[in-house]
Amino acid sequence: MKKVGIIGVGEYLPEKVLSNADLEKMVDTSDEWITTRTGIKERRLVSKHEAVSDLSIKAAKAALRDAKVKAQELDLIIVASITPDFQFPSVACLLQNALGAKGAAAFDISAACAGFVYAIIIAQQFIARGNYKNVLVVGAEVLSSITDWQDRNTCVLFGDGAAAAVLSEVKSGGILSTYMGCDGSASELLMVPGGGSRNPTSHKTIDNRMHYIKMRGNELFKIAVRSMQEAGEKALSLCGLSAKDVDCFIPHQANVRILTAVASRLGIAQEKIYFNIQKYGNMSSASLATALCGAVKEKRIKKGDIVLLDAFGAGLVWGACVIKW
Ligand code: UT7
């Protein structure tokens, strides 16, 4: 088995900023409530004609530049997204064409907020076995397209963005262990009920606002903490490390209170947590991706550091990955 590492990262956040003050004018909420309950101060939104592939292309180009890999050298593109441009074709195929990555196979995966860590784990398999050399992994979302802007329970939480990573064989370090979990029995806690084959789009689904995110946040909160703790512990123990060895903890950015609770249950010092939720909100698969990219760009991670990626989302699914940088 070959050692697999992340050799480049890149991100793209749309320019438009929606602040808590802006939301106060849209629904019955307050900056005080949003800040204390979630940690979010603002989030980014796409402009009118921007879709997930547009965000993905910019993030992917930045990651390829960072990795010094040409698009033509890519063997595989995996995009994690729950807000693809179309039901089909996949975002990954649109990206393959836009990048000119003629030799690359391409597909999307649906693992919601855990999508980026799931995609990294999938990519690792192909490279470790020697099937592929360079794999591009993208986490990209336009959650504003499935957000009910009349529902204060959800609309204050989400944002749009994208980030990408290039994975390749490395001589030392790289991915030390991975773990994935799932509990499909609680899938109704977080879903978009309309627009699929269960409830195809109709006047009725639109009138009932079934094409928007429905979330039972309070019930999810405890499961999120428990699942992310489990994922972190399992991934660390699989490579013989403990929380004390972690230099940078990069979790999915669902809620500051979830992240601090997970870190404290794992025994990771609070200052080792990387946050970007205050400026971007929850961007599902793009949250972990942009957090990794931010941590690298802000030099929160240096060579030889132990990095723990940890995510949880709709499905319910969760996963973690320990990387020696
Ligand atoms: O990313 C994937 C996974 N996502 C998660 O794991 C999300 C997990 N859940 C959460 O982060 C939190 O549960 C939320 C941020 C969604 C909600 O925070 P909470 O502390 O659990 O609040 P709550 O749902 O228990 O609501 C408390 C009160 C309610 O009022 P009453 O019934 O106590 O009078 C809500 O109606 O807060 C009210 N509320 C709001 N008030 C002002 C709900 N949303 C708002 C709002 N502004 N935006």
Image (cartoon, helix red, strand yellow):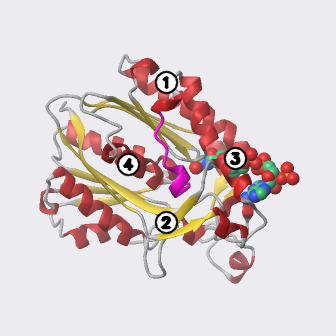
> Is 245 situated above or below 118?
above
Looking at the image, which residue is at 22% across and 68% down?
99
Is 80 or 17 nearer to us in this picture?
Answer: 17
Q: Which residue was labeled with disc 4?
A: 294
| Quadrant of the snapshot with the N terminus | top left
Residue 83 position, x and y percent, is 49, 66
Distance from the alpha carbon under mark 1 to that under mark 4: 24 Å
Distance from the alpha carbon under mark 1 to that under mark 3: 28 Å
Q: Which amino acid does label 2 sit on?
A: Thr
Indicate whether residue 159 is drawn in magenta.
no
Q: What is the magenta range?
A: 273-281
- Which mark is first along the chain, 2 or 1? 2
Q: Which residue was labeled with disc 2?
A: 83
Looking at the image, which residue is at 36% across and 56% down?
163
**Left or right: where does residue 196 sit relative to residue 46?**
right
Q: Which amino acid does label 1 sit on?
A: Glu
| Quadrant of the snapshot with the C terminus | top left
